Amino acid sequence: MQFEFTEQQRMIRDMAKDFAAKEIVPIAAEMDEKEQFPADVVKQMGALGFMGMNVPEQYGGAALDTICYVLAMEEVSRACASCGVIMSVNNSLVCWPIETYGTDEQKKRFLTPLAKGEKLGAYCLSEPNAGTDAANQLTTAKPDGDGWVINGMKNFITNGATADLLIVFAQTNPELKYKGIRAFIVENTAEGFSVIRKEEKMGIRASDTAQLAFDNVKVSAEQVLGGEGTGFKIAMSTLDGGRIGIAAQALGISGAAYEAARVYATQREQFGRPIGAFQAIQWKIADMATRLHAAQLLTYRAAWAKDQGGRYSEESAMAKLAASEASHFITNEAVQIFGGNGYSKEYPVERHFRDAKITEIYEGTSEAQRMVISAMELKK
Ligand code: CAA
């Protein structure tokens, strides 16, 4: 067992850190305040190879390992959690399933522009009645000549209003329940596709989260991803990787809040001493640092497990559960250490506190992660 990153992993982390410090940190608070989608940052991330980090070079990707992806996600999210989720969805939830389940033709046509950052992707699984119960898909796909016609509504879709390409899950035969679900690649230019509304959110406010309608949207046979009845497994296996991305996002948010609080504890004086001289603050720092490092280890382990092949559902669920709950704890303690200043928009910890909450909800709530973990544990 080794606890060191490779030279390439360190290089990617440093590159992401420099990029985030120069291009994202100065505008992160304003983008959050104005709910402004970071189109320029996304373009630059595309040019750096951050939008298709694990995709093979022949399909326009950077062909890096999952640890590189986690380290870049951490640095981008440390600067701006909204930029982090945009990057994570494109990499994990859109590039990965097309690379894994797509035909060569689909990879050339859809994956390559996504991996190069020329196009942006979205993953459309959640519906008004399919949240944690993801198998309860009411969106339908019916055969139509050589292709299919899709009808339904999708909820809380990251990149929903800006994405060029959307992976859409739909039920083809309700009697078969989850075995009737199939996955489709839909272009945002398709007739019948529309954005119903954009959500106003507590955190990750610069990312676009939308409710979408599919009203007799026609897709060709070439836009079906995977075989008959495989849609639910495609959705779940894709989320196994997505959860590693969200764990990395949570680590980035935690890292930013922890570092701000650590420095503040050495500078802010009360009763004639830096507040870090008091045991009440020392214990908070110790607990924050320990939870951050524990979550990092679980996340790097999950990334490593993904690259070994085989199933890594439990590792990724543990990583997301630990990292998101750590980010809740750490950002809360950071606000507490900052006191009144922590509650003010003058300091970034209030943004980190708001951003942390979503990591316990999307790509499977903490309760869903516990379902995955306990199911695996009890089967052993
Ligand atoms: N990989 C491969 N197959 C899997 C799998 C995985 N990770 N997980 C389940 N399956 C298979 C099972 O083996 C089973 O197949 P068989 O019958 O052939 O054995 C089948 O799928 C059904 O599995 P379950 O019985 O476990 O399914 P379930 O309906 O009980 O669901 C659940 C379990 C864990 C609650 C699951 O529905 C779940 O993860 N829910 C959360 C949904 C979620 O994460 N939504 C996030 C939305 S996307 C988002 O947030 C994106 C964004 O924009 C940021």
Image (cartoon, rainbow, N blue to C red):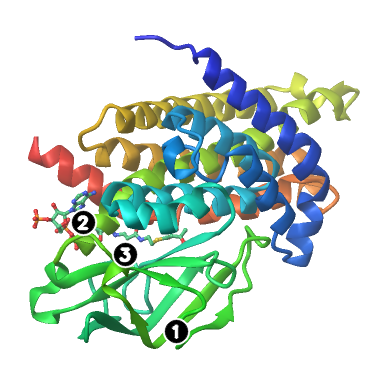
Task: Mark 3 or mark 2: name the one nearer the start of the chain.
Answer: 3
Where is mark 1, residue-wise?
213
Quarter holding the N terminus? top left
Q: Position of residue 370 (x, y in %)?
A: 28, 48
Please state which amino acid type lies under the numbered disc 3. Answer: Thr
Query: Contact (CB < 8 A) between labels 3 and 2?
Result: no
In the rendered view, tell whether residue 76 sits above or below residue 174. above
Q: Residue at x 46, y 81 (%)?
A: 190
Quarter of the image that includes the C terminus: top left
In the image, the residue with mark 3 has its CB under 8 Å from the nearest atom of ligand 1: yes
The local crowd at label 3, few if under 14, some if 14 to 19, many if 20 or more residues have their Cα within 10 Å, is some
Viewer-side label of 3, 1:
1
Name the disc covering residue 233, or none.
2
Ligand 1, what quadrant? bottom left
**SS under mark 1:** strand
- Write down the residue under mark 3: 132
Q: Is residue 115 above or below residue 197?
A: above
Quick one: label 3 or label 1, which is nearer the N terminus?
3
| Residue 373 location, quadrant | top left
Q: Would residue 346 appear left or right of 211 to someone viewing this image?
A: right
The earlier-in-sequence mark between 2 and 1 is 1
**Distance Cα–Cα, label 3 vs label 2:** 15 Å
- Picture residue at 8% right of the left edge, 80% below the top: 175
Q: Is residue 181 visible?
A: yes
Which residue does the image show at 20% across and 70% down from the upper left?
A: 181
Amino acid at circle 1? Ala
On screen, residue 26 versus residue 223, left or right, reads right
The three-letter amino acid code for the residue at tag 2 is Lys
Q: Secondary structure at mark 3?
A: loop
